[in-house]
Amino acid sequence: MATAKKAAAKKKPAAKKPAAKKAVKKTVAKKAPAKKVAAKKPAAKKVVAKKAPAKKAVAKKAAKKATTRKPNAAFMKPMTPSAALAAVIGANPLPRTDVTKKVWDYIKKHKLQDAVNRRNINADDKLKAVFNGKKTVSMFEMTKLISGHLK
């Protein structure tokens, strides 16, 4: 008899728990339609509000295009080339930008750019002195090496 009472006691609480869960589901189902109706009205207002800032953004972009960039004064300062670099570009003091342009003019005039990998420069005797004895240098490494020859 004791086992029969225990089995009956175990079944009763198990039956009560699912009933409680069903009641919770019913209350959630009742609240959901009320939220959907309230959510639809503000959504229509948001669409109208989004159209106005789009016009302002177009006006701001047009204003940015009208401004021009000023060159950095450090790039425009004349620098004196070393003796090795002076053999390629001349001994006159030049800004860094003009030094790079003259080196590229020299490379193109003497056809020193690699035909297969165009990022590489094959140095001749004058450029080997500028490139610290390297025979082939990438164009990105070239500017680093040239800056070591400017004072």
Image (cartoon, grey):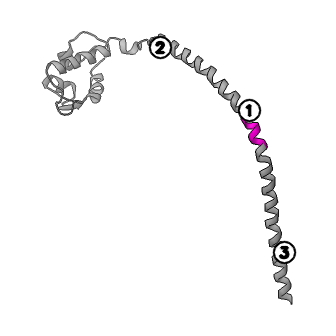
The crowd level at tag 3 (other Cα within 10 Å; few <14, some 14-19, many 20+) is: few
Q: Amino acid at mark 1?
A: Lys
Q: Which residue is mark 3?
A: 12
Point out which mark residue 41 bears: 1
Q: Is residue 106 left or right of residue 62?
A: left
Q: Is residue 63 left or right of residue 97?
A: right
Locate the N terminus and report the quarter of the image it occupies: bottom right
| Residue 82 magenta | no
Point out which mark residue 65 bears: 2
Q: Is residue 88 left or right of residue 144?
A: left
N-terminal-most mark, 1 or 3: 3
Q: Is residue 42 visible?
A: yes
| Mark 1 or mark 2, whichever is nearer to me | 1
Q: What secondary structure characterizes most of the magenta part?
A: helix
Q: Is residue 134 above or below residue 31?
A: above
What secondary structure is marked by label 2?
helix
**Residue at the spot 22% in from the left edge and 11% down from the top edge:** 91
Q: Is residue 50 left or right of residue 90?
A: right
What secondary structure is marked by label 3?
helix
Q: Amino acid at mark 2?
A: Lys
Q: CA distance from mark 1 to mark 2?
A: 39 Å
Q: Could you tell me residue 35's position as x and y percent?
A: 76, 42
